[in-house]
Image (cartoon, rainbow, N blue to C red):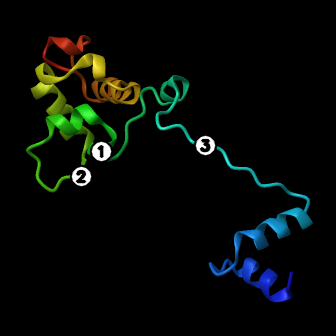
């Protein structure tokens, strides 16, 4: 490997090949590994964020919310309070069996943060 390639790696240039990076890793005694990331986070990962409330809620991350917010043209994100309002007004349209664990956790976190009834199916979240 040339000194120029090592210098380019040190500078973070994008023109360096992956093979050059792997050679540097091997010279440093390091290894490279890649893992497949699951499409859906595990149930345990979802439990780790119980009660956590995001600053902005992306509609694309929550399928049921995206269906409820169909009339919002050009809106990709909502505030947590707007999100809770949409869930509360439209709960009758939600398919509870289709709720993803992360969406259920979001609803629970919104209910904890802003109030609401304990039973989501009662018309409020």
From the image, tell me which residue sits under label 3. Answer: 36
**Which mark identifies residue 76?**
2
The answer to whether mark 3 and mark 2 are in CB contact below 8 A is: no
Specify which label sits upstream in the sequence, 1 or 2.
Answer: 1
Q: Position of residue 57 (x, y in %)?
A: 30, 43
Residue at disc 3, secondary structure:
loop
**Nearer mark to the viewer, of 3 and 1:** 3
The answer to whether mark 1 and mark 2 are in CB contact below 8 A is: yes
Q: Position of residue 64 (x, y in %)?
A: 24, 31
Q: Position of residue 2 (x, y in %)?
A: 85, 86
**Nearer mark to the viewer, of 3 and 2:** 3
**Which mark identifies residue 86?**
none
Left or right: residue 98 compared with residue 124: right
Q: Quadrant of residue 85?
A: top left
Q: CA distance from mark 3 to mark 1?
A: 22 Å
Q: In the image, what residue occupies the spot 8% across and 44% down?
A: 71
Q: Label 2 neighbourhood size at 10 Å, few (<14), some (14-19), many (20+)?
A: some
Q: In the image, what residue occupies the spot 60% across and 43% down?
A: 36
Specify which label sits upstream in the sequence, 3 or 1.
Answer: 3
Q: CA distance from mark 1 to mark 2?
A: 7 Å
From the image, tell me which residue sits under label 1. Answer: 60
Residue at disc 1, secondary structure:
helix
């Amino acid at each position: 490997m040339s000194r120029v390639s090592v210098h380019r790696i040190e500078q973070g240039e994008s023109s360096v090949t992956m093979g050059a990076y792997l050679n540097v890793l091997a010279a440093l005694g390091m290894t490279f590994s890649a893992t497949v990331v699951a499409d859906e986070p595990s149930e345990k990962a979802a439990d780790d964020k119980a009660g956590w409330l995001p600053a902005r809620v992306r509609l694309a991350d929550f399928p049921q919310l995206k269906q409820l917010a169909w009339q919002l043209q050009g809106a990709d994100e909502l505030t947590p309070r707007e999100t809770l309002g949409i869930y509360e007004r439209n709960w009758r349209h939600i398919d509870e069996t289709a709720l993803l664990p992360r969406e259920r956790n979001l609803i629970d976190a919104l209910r904890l943060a802003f109030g609401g009834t304990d039973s989501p199916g009662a018309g409020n979240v």
